[in-house]
Amino acid sequence: MRFRHRAAAGFATLLLPLAGLVGLASNAEAATNATATYTKTQDWGTGFGAQWTVKNTGTAAISSWTIEWDFPSGTSVTSAWDADVTSSGTHWTAKNKSYNGSIAPGASVSFGFNGAGSGSPSHCKLNGGGCDGTTVPGDTAPSAPGTPTASGVTDTSVTLSWGAATDDNGIKNYDVLRDGATVATVTTTSYTDNGLTAGTDYSYTVQARDTADQTGPVSGSVAVHTTGGGTTPPPSGDTVKLGYFTEWGIYGRNYNVKNLVTSGSAAKITHINYAFGNVTNGKCAIGDSYADYDKAFTADQSVSGVADTWDQPLRGNFNQLRELKAKYPHIKVLWSFGGWTWSGGFGAAAQNPAAFAQSCYDLVEDPRWADVFDGIDIDWEYPNACGLSCDTSGNAAFKNLMSALRAKFGSNNLVTAAVTADGSAGGKIEAADYAGAAQYVDWYNVMTYDFFGAWDAKGPTAPHSPLTSYSGIPKAGFTTADAMAAYKAIGVPAKKLLIGIGFYGRGWTGVTQDAPGGTATGPAAGTYEQGIEDYKVLKSSCPATGAVAGTAYAHCGSNWWSYDTPATIASKMTWARNQGLGGAFFWEFSGDTSNGELVNAISNGLS
């Protein structure tokens, strides 16, 4: 993997008396003499309007009031009136204005707000007591329900069932979430969802609410594909659609996690590799602490639409990924370590695999962001061979490293690796024990791109990601088909092999020949690096003029580029399905168009 630098519709009302934090009040104003009621006044899908009403149920006047509550991640207050509303993470506090703090016996005061997301409040407190007029019970939130199972799938419906959640005061009901949005609230542990679209993918989770109206964590997700609508693809959980998100993309490229939402890509992928963590002194280490967990995103940059605050526990890309997973619970995120630039650290790591695995586990499972990551990806370029630097750790080093990682991360985490696509005789696939290591990984990301490029400044021009061989190819074995065949030949299961797609092109300048095989004078100019350019730029600046070996090329002026298009990606996905591969991955999101046309081609091609 190259490390390249640096309003209202649908009127509904929901009354929820709640219990649950600490307010500022004298004993005479305690919540035992008042109640707070939450009303959802409007709901327009991506947001809502709501209000809180404080009623004095006592015999003496109340001089001030403070309401506190929690919203689930992804739900927030965007504007408010008649109260001063602040937040710390997912915890919200509202205090009376100077003109409405006093409430006479039997009287009520309300304040309103608009919100983003779809969650309901929990852990409510009014002046230190319960919002229902009682003292605050010392109860805990309910546990997560069991992961739902799907049955009776038809063109338009599915029946879901799940294991009951537990709570010290009892379970009141369950919210059923489809693709992150609540579609039903039920008191039983099953639900039939109707009115679905034939031949469509859905993701379901469940969340419990206890008798104090506290909500617990969401369950694991189950993927459902309704019948009809053409050929039914394999379950999305069986086919990997993975994209790399680069930590440095938030700088010059101005590509944030939110772009996965606005492009529509988040709904069409199954996994994200966050690139890259460093490998140094034999350990996993932070790559860019500011980008990873410190940068404060503004409201318009944030997945949730809420600006980061100076004092929230976690910011940066990690928090944005957390918000993305709350919105798209089917997505799993892996932290990728190494890459072209930082692979030189793997040699020291290979000297003590157990210590390396422990360091990686401690970092990935750091309590500040453990919920963000579902596993680890190793991008060693290349074990017992040369990349930016040369490694001499021996044939067994890669296998030993992956074995230690699997032992430490266990079966509940994903362990994957990006691996060479050099299928030439005596090439990099033969340099390490990839077959022996395969038993420890969930899959290999086979980097079936960057076969040829303008590091050979005078050419010959050649597509950097050929699917198959062709007459005049500069080096035999440098194709996707050769790489996959080599891995299968040594015993790596096809389902553990993912085909790689580059969301960029490689190019030369000083070229007069349209077909591959021409001479050049050097690399073509690129936005960030000579000889390389994003697909989103090339599709307009140098449209494809031909195709060879399953990929496209373009000759415009004196420049010659090769890159994949939606059409060539579609043919590669068909090939991958016919080969029984486990899916596809790509490098990387920011090279795609603003409407995610390459991600869409991968998703459709594997469905």
Image: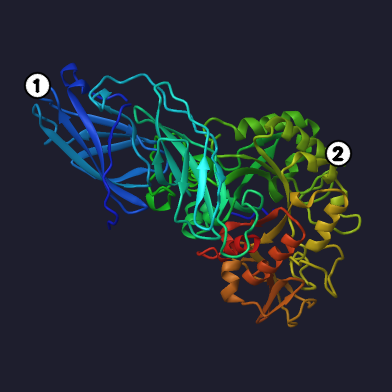
Quarter of the image for residue 103 reads top left
Q: Where in the figure is residue 220, as x and y percent of width and height?
A: 54, 39
Q: Helix, strand, or loop for circle 2?
A: loop
Give the number of the mark in front: 2 or 1.
1
Sequence-earlier tag: 2 or 1: 1
- At a point 44% along the width and 28% down the height, the residue shown is 142
- At a point 60% along the width and 63% down the height, the residue shown is 604
Q: Which residue is mark 2?
A: 396
Q: Is residue 238 left or right of residue 97?
A: right
Vertical position of residue 137 compared to residue 535: above or below: above
Vertical position of residue 129 compared to residue 226: above or below: above
Question: Quadrant where the C terminus lies?
Answer: bottom right
Q: Where in the figure is residue 134, as x and y percent of width and height?
A: 25, 21
Residue 275 or residue 74, whichever sits in front: 74
Q: Where in the figure is residue 382, as x and y percent of width and height?
A: 79, 48
The mark found on residue 60 in the picture is 1
Tell me the CA gap for discs 2 and 1. 79 Å
Q: Residues within 10 Å of mark 1 (few under 14, many from 20)?
A: some
Vertical position of residue 189 compared to residue 519: above or below: above
- At a point 72% along the width and 32% down the height, the residue shown is 356
Would residue 348 be seen by someone viewing this image from the given angle? no
Vertical position of residue 454 compared to residue 120: above or below: below
The mark found on residue 332 in the picture is none
Residue 141 or residue 243, whichever sits in front: 141
Quarter of the image for residue 499 reads bottom right
Q: Helix, strand, or loop for circle 1?
A: loop
